[in-house]
Image: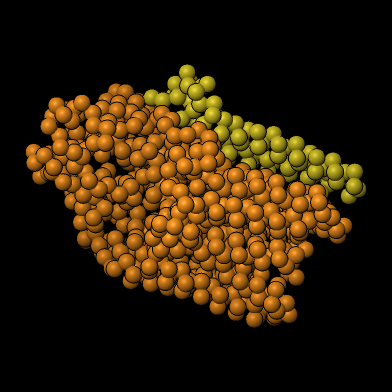
Amino acid sequence: MSDKSASAYWAANIRLITICLVIWALASFGFGIILRPLISGIAVGGTDLGFWFAQQGSILTFLVLIFFYAMRMNKIDREFGVDEQ
Amino acid sequence: MDQFTLNLIVVGLSFALYIGIAIWARAGSTSEFYAANRGVHPVLNGMATAADWMSAASFISMAGIIAFVGYDNSTYLMGWTGGYVLLALLLAPYLRKFGRFTVPDFIGDRFYSQTARIVAVIALLVISITYVIGQMAGAGVAFSRFLEVSSSTGLWIASAVVFVYAVLGGMKGITYTQVAQYCVLIVAYTIPAIFISLQLTGSFLPQIGLFSADASGQPLLAHLDGLLTDLGFRTYTEHHSNTLDMVLFTMALMIGTAGLPHVIIRFFTVPKVSDARASAGWALVFIALLYTVAPAVGAMARLNIITTIYPNGIGEASLTYDGRPDWMHNWEHTGLLRFEDKNGDGMIQYYNDANAPAIAAESGWAGNEMTTFNRDILVLANPEIAGLPGWVIALIAAGGLAAALSTAAGLLLAISSAVSHDLIKSVFNPNISERSEMLAARISMAVAILIATLLGLNPPGFAAQVVAIAFGLAAASLFPTIMMGIFSKTMNSTGAVAGMLVGLGAEMIYIFTYLGWFFIPGTNMLDNTAANWLFGISPASFGTVAAVLNFIVAYVVLAMTKPAPQHIQDLVESIRIPRGAGSAQSH
């Protein structure tokens, strides 16, 4: 593969990683800890949404993120012709 | 049939299964021994990774850790799962493409430096040995409690079983055994949790039950918060700790998880780069099955204990000593649960006497009468509290042992491959034959088991701190270095070695400052209290800071020295692209 498409492939990967890590941080450090007071108005089963994110939501978000990343990367691999045959 | 016989049968059957699998999956080559010939299906690898990762601490202690603190200890839930996102996105696919067998292998080759390789081996050995001691000790305790042998006899049985399947099967045997161990441990964990959730909330999913209403008509968590406040305890759902420390501790657990060598090497076993990405997801699916149930087990068990002691509500007649249920008697025998009738009224009072509520003075309470309550009881006694049949109790014994043994085996493999592959083959004797290397790997694994057993027999007093340190060290040393090896083409050996040494050094010094030099009591320079911590950062959270120092030092040194040579930059270029991962390669 040419240098140009190699750097475009890597740039696409970095972009995807950045998006995923922003969501990763938002679901755990954000809603689970730092932003919890901001969303404390949303009640969930005897407590608030931040507690749910800290004990359930963050883990579910991580799961979705990994499979989303794996699927998108498979697609990007094929687009740039670098997938494994 | 009595409980002891039942425990013996269920645990015996599970061991027979593990050894049967080990004989079936014997390793015949170094590729099979180190990486299961890279032929493990990603879903099975995910299951094996989950068993590898979830130790005796996850299985036995985590629900209790959350139950007695509540929201603030959500750090463990987020930290120990969030690391898998980092693994899947930042490390696993590239390390799989690189196609070697160990973590120091990558660091040594990528940074074209034997020094870097040796520093990585030292970090790996310190991390893995401290970790494995806790597993062996945990297995010994589980044996002694359920099989009525002494703790040291239990430890020797545990090491004999691990010896058979780890030394014989290497990664291949360990992987397929871990798949079986995962099944045993997850069934053992979830069955009692489902029954308790059904009894308390009517919901058979503990994850839903945690946020449902209980028999009192209010949501379970609100009910629990109310009871805790009445008894002078801190509320369960509110935030009481330092926010900065909570963030840093969660981050340290996340990057520590992603940097643990025995977890990373699991991703060398799958056939393709795309499988490495998906396999991290599958690992998290199987881990989440336990980690989303654990907080429900914690909250429900805490509520159960309070309502058992105060069946008529707080302020009314509480549980009498004569009327206490069988499971309390059973656990009092172990010394992990103790009562003392301080005011001599024949009834049990459980409350926070350091912050005594008004009710205590009104009712003539003379102190908390549940004087010992070991947090590990929560999971182990769960089936008895829920009144489940004896075979479920036996299953918990088998599950706890499966969790300890599977993690110990993974750690032992990481240790032995670092010695036989990275020290003997790469540093001392590059011309060693494959046969001799396998023999060296098996001998070093046997030695590692022996050392772990001996240390497990006389666990150093600081065992608990040491596990936290394993995470801190992995976060401070291996994770940043591997990441820079992939994401920076120009990072050179001087920068990487300087970064690792500064990261490791800063982490050690910060920990020793508060916990004593080499954990010798009395040698600490400052008391380990929040007031003394730098910016309120606890020693356990410092791994995050040390990791940042590692990155900064590496880049500063890089700016002052020559970038990595062209052939290394080409190597980095090639590991970034999945095509051509092919089969195992040796060097």
Q: Residue furthest top?
A: A41
Q: Residue at x 75, y 36 (%)?
A: A15
For this rendering, which residue is in front, B197 or B526? B526
User: How far across and down, in percent of the image, does residue B285 sit?
Assistant: 54, 45
Q: Which of the chains is yellow? A: A
The residue at 81%/51% (across/down) is: B560
| Quadrant placement of the N terminus of chain B | bottom left
Q: Is B150 situated left or right of B163 in this image?
A: left
Q: Residue B446, relative to residue B315: is it above or below?
A: below
Q: Residue furthest left?
A: B345
Visible residue check, residue B206? no
Q: Is residue B381 above or below residue B566?
A: above
The x, y position of residue B557, in whole percent, is: 76, 52
Which residue is pictured at 69% across the width and 34% down the height?
Answer: A19
Is residue B561 visible in the rendered image? The answer is yes
B420 relative position to B303: left or right: right
- Letter of the chain shown orange in the rendering: B
Residue B214, position in %: x, y?
Answer: 31, 28
Name the foreground residue: B265 vs B288.
B265
Residue lying furthest front: B525
In the depicted structure, whether residue B354 falls above or below residue B468:
above
Position in image of residue B158 (x %, y %): 40, 68
Quadrant into which the C terminus of chain B falls:
bottom right
- Going 73% across and 77% down the picture, which residue do you hit? B430
